[in-house]
Image (cartoon, helix red, strand yellow):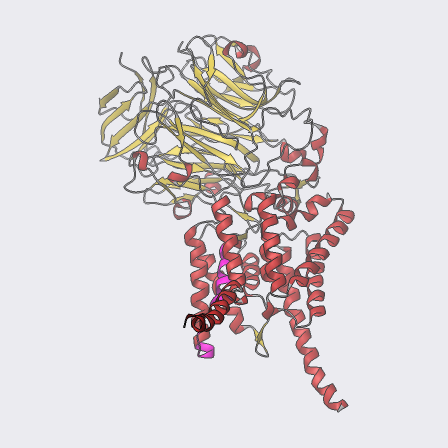
């Protein structure tokens, strides 16, 4: 429960924090699941995959359960990355409150190292990702603030902590780029690296969008435009307007990259709000314009044309080949506040959101939500890529028929079957695991990478698979979607009777490695050549 | 020689200068709405996109020219259609293109089709927008949250708009509506327990600037007498209050949609009775 001054709009404010991230924390070859809970005093869960179809919560015995104690804030999400290159994924928890960094003690437990690392004492973040922005072989850290960092939501000094505008707010939390010094400490280089936004960040992800070998950074902001930062090596440069992605302000809540046309270029999926009869923002599918590349890269929004525009009050979404047909599909969850089905808050919401800054920015001026819903009980979306320029919505047909208030989506091959399963964390709802059944004729291949000269998690490594005369590009990610992280292992669907050609791996160190005719139907564990 | 020359040149130059300074009233509203569009977009990027707004303006003006030529066999002045198009371009929010075309066509078409005694009944853009948000809510919403929610742009628009509206002798309509809206806002706050700041919030937003300055003041769709115009503005605010109590997000558009034509029809009915009465008296 937050400060009582927010009681009248508590379901609106305390509406995030259900999050899921996938990790093989004990290196037993089975993906495990870490789940965040944002209830004060609640426990997070670390579900160890027992490999026989069962999971066991080992968070308490591993020391990563008690992270929502009163006075320390509550979790919003978690990302895993091996920041000290010891071979075991470490855990960064970002919160509305005190962020936490846990060192993974070789899969046997975790040691809290927050203070030694030099992380801030308090922030209100809804996104964080691991990335090696300077290519020095150790993972750096980006954290995106939502509420300003001087706001303690449990002890408000005043109620003027809401966004100053519904679409142009710049009074949110600051951003943090921490450079990993390699000795367990991190240095705040945010300003030095040219990142000084105070927009309300809800999602971030990094990928090499220009083929420079360096990860660029995309931030989806609530109450405003998205930001795209090109990584020039010694500095980040904001190019949102220049590239076309930072023009129309919406309510950005998700960033996912996917090579949806199999042409080795990433499209970027950003979720927003659409509510019939009130607000039709539409989600954005930013696709690189033909003939643009490098610094001249330009994007156009093809969400409508491809059929992935309307997803309700959309939150987390991830690309993955869900049916192993060789093209990337899209899973989306949604729904904001599901309370009384017959009464909704949209009228009051739209009324106050249209007002002057002095009205909208003060929580006291917001009408009480009482027990009303706001875009609640929404059907989810599973969009299958037909490979011909359209996504077909099949959620109900394939069994994704829950109507919880979905937040975070992560994809993982939970049973090592060569199939992507879906894990969804819901606000005020259960954790859902959708076990995927795929026609066995459609084949697959997976790559589990380990860096040597590059960061050991291989975050930022790009894998281009060539088969059947086509190619698909994927990148090892240090966090994507909404408060989520997919499995680090890369999964490619291949379709029927695939003719394998080669796989090209470009490691973050810059080294390129080619493997000829990799066998389908296998998990390939590849270590970066020394 | 020179003196006569000066004497001959002076009057036309002064007249031209005066005429230039005192812009034809027909251009005031288009100039004002263009100013809102340009300033809003340059400062906050309010447009959904250039093509959509351009499409609305082009469709609106083309429809006006074609229908004017077909129905009245003359080329109508495009200022009115320009305002309609730009209103549609700013107010309609849709990721699709077709709503901008359809809404513009509906708006202009209503002027030519929905007529009684040679008067059209609805403000064109009000008609188009109200029909669109009612019939295709899954595709169309209206602008309600733009212009940065900041104070200074809003004040600038209010001051400039008031001056222009005063000059075209319609300020009393805006003033009556605003005063009525505020009174009803406080009444709603008292009735529902909602903060009064939330109830007056819409009035501080950009959608209402367009609604107040360009829709409820439309000279072709309001009654003639000054007191009647004030009464209609009051009734629009009253209807809007009822719709707001019913939690209608598009209350102002629907209120004007309902009250405006009713007022016009009432005036026509009263007009139809007056000559008979006068004749009988005579």
User: In the image, residue A392 lies at what x, y percent?
Assistant: 41, 44
Does the magenta run of residues contain B83? yes
Residue at image coords 59%, 17%: A67
Name, please, the residue furthest toward the right.
B190
The answer, for residue A138, to whether it is visible in the render is yes
Residue B215 lies in what quarter of the image?
Answer: bottom right
User: In the image, residue A11 lies at what x, y percent?
Assistant: 65, 34
Q: Is residue A313 above or below residue A38?
A: below
Magenta segment's dominant SS is helix
Residue at image coords 62%, 40%: A357
Residue at image coords 45%, 36%: A331
User: In the image, residue B200 lies at what x, y percent?
Assistant: 69, 48
Does the magenta run of residues contain B23? no
Q: Nearer the viewer, residue A503 or B139?
A: B139
**Image side of residue B63 versus residue A294, left or right:** right
User: In the image, residue A91 lies at what x, y percent?
Assistant: 49, 16
Magenta region: B70-89
**Image side of residue A290 versus residue A125, left or right:** left
Q: Nearer the viewer, residue B226 or B48?
A: B226
**Image side of residue A284 versus residue A223, left or right:** left
The answer, for residue A253, to whether it is visible in the render is no
């Amino acid at each position: 429960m937050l400060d009582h001054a927010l009681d009248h709009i508590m379901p609106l404010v305390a509406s995030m924090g259900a999050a899921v991230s996938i990790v093989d924390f004990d290196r037993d070859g089975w993906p495990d699941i870490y789940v965040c809970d944002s209830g004060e005093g609640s426990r997070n869960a670390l579900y160890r995959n027992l490999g026989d179809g069962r999971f066991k919560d080992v968070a308490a015995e591993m020391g990563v359960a008690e992270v929502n104690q009163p006075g320390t804030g509550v979790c919003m999400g978690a990302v895993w990355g091996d920041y000290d290159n010891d071979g075991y994924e470490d855990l960064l928890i970002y919160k509305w409150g005190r962020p936490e960094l846990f060192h993974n003690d070789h899969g046997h437990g975790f040691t809290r190292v927050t203070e030694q690392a030099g992380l801030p004492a308090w922030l209100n973040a809804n996104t964080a990702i691991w990335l090696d922005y300077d290519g020095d072989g150790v993972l750096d850290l980006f954290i995106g603030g939502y509420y300003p960092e001087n706001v303690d939501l449990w002890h408000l000094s005043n109620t003027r902590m809401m966004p100053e505008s519904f679409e142009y707010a710049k009074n949110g939390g600051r951003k943090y780029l921490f450079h990993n010094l390699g000795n367990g400490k991190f240095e705040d280089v945010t300003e030095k690296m040219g990142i000084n936004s105070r927009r309300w960040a809800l999602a971030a992800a990094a990928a090499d969008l220009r083929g420079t070998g360096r990860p660029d950074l995309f931030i989806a902001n609530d109450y405003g435009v998205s930001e795209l930062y090109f990584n020039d090596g010694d500095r980040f440069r904001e190019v949102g307007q220049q590239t076309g992605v930072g023009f129309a302000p919406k309510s950005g809540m998700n960033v996912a990259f996917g090579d949806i046309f199999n042409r080795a270029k990433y499209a970027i999926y950003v979720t927003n709000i659409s509510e019939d009869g009130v607000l039709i923002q539409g989600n954005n599918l930013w696709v690189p314009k033909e003939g643009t590349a490098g610094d001249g890269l330009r994007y156009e929004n093809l969400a409508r044309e491809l059929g992935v525009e309307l997803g309700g009050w959309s939150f987390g979404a991830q690309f993955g080949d869900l049916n192993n047909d060789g093209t990337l599909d899209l899973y989306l969850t949604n729904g904001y506040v599901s309370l009384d089905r017959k009464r909704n808050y949209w009228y009051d919401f739209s009324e106050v959101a249209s007002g002057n800054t002095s009205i909208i920015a003060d929580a006291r001026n917001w009408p009480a939500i009482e027990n009303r819903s706001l875009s609640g009980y929404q059907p989810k979306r599973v969009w299958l890529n037909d490979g011909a320029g359209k996504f077909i919505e099949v959620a109900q047909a394939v069994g994704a028929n829950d109507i919880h208030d979905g937040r975070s989506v992560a994809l993982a091959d939970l049973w090592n079957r060569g199939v992507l399963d879906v894990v969804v964390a819901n606000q005020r709802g259960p954790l859902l695991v959708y076990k995927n059944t795929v026609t066995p004729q459609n084949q697959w291949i997976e790559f589990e990478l380990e860096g040597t000269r590059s960061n050991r998690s291989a975050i930022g490594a790009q894998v281009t698979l060539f088969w059947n005369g086509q190619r698909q590009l994927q990148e090892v990610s240090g966090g994507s979607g909404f408060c989520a992280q997919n499995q680090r292992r890369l999964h490619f669907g291949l379709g029927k009777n695939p003719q394998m050609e080669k796989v090209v791996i470009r490691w973050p160190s810059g080294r390129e490695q080619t493997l000829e005719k990799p066998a389908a139907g296998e998990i390939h564990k590849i270590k970066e050549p020394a | 020689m020179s003196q006569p020359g000066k004497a001959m040149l002076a009057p036309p130059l002064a007249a031209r200068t005066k005429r230039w300074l005192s812009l034809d009233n027909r251009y005031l509203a288009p100039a004002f709405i263009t100013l809102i569009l340009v300033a809003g977009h340059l400062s906050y990027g309010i447009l959904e996109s250039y093509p959509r707004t351009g499409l609305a303006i082009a469709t609106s003006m083309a429809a006006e020219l074609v229908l004017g030529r077909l129905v009245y066999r003359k080329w109508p002045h495009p200022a009115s259609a320009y305002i309609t198009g730009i209103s549609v371009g700013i107010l309609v929010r849709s990721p699709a293109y077709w709503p901008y075309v359809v809404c513009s066509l509906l708006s202009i078409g209503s002027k030519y089709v929905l007529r009684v005694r040679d008067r059209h009944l609805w403000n064109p853009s009000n008609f188009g927008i109200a029909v669109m948000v009612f019939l295709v809510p899954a595709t169309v919403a209206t602008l309600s949250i733009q212009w940065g929610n900041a104070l200074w742009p809003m004040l600038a628009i209010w001051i400039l708009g008031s001056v222009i509206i005063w000059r075209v002798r319609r300020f009393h309509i805006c003033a009556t509506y605003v005063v009525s809206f505020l009174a009803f806002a406080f009444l709603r706050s008292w009735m529902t327990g909602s903060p009064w700041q939330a109830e007056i919030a819409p009035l501080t937003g950009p959608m209402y600037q367009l609604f107040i300055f360009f829709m409820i003041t439309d000279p072709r769709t309001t009654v003639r007498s000054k007191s009647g115009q004030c009464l209609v503005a009051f009734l629009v605010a009253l209807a809007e209050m009822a719709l707001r109590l019913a939690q209608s997000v598009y209350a102002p558009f629907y209120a004007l949609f309902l009250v405006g034509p009713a007022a016009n029809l009432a005036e026509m009915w009263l007009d139809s009775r007056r000559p008979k009465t006068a004749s009988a008296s005579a």
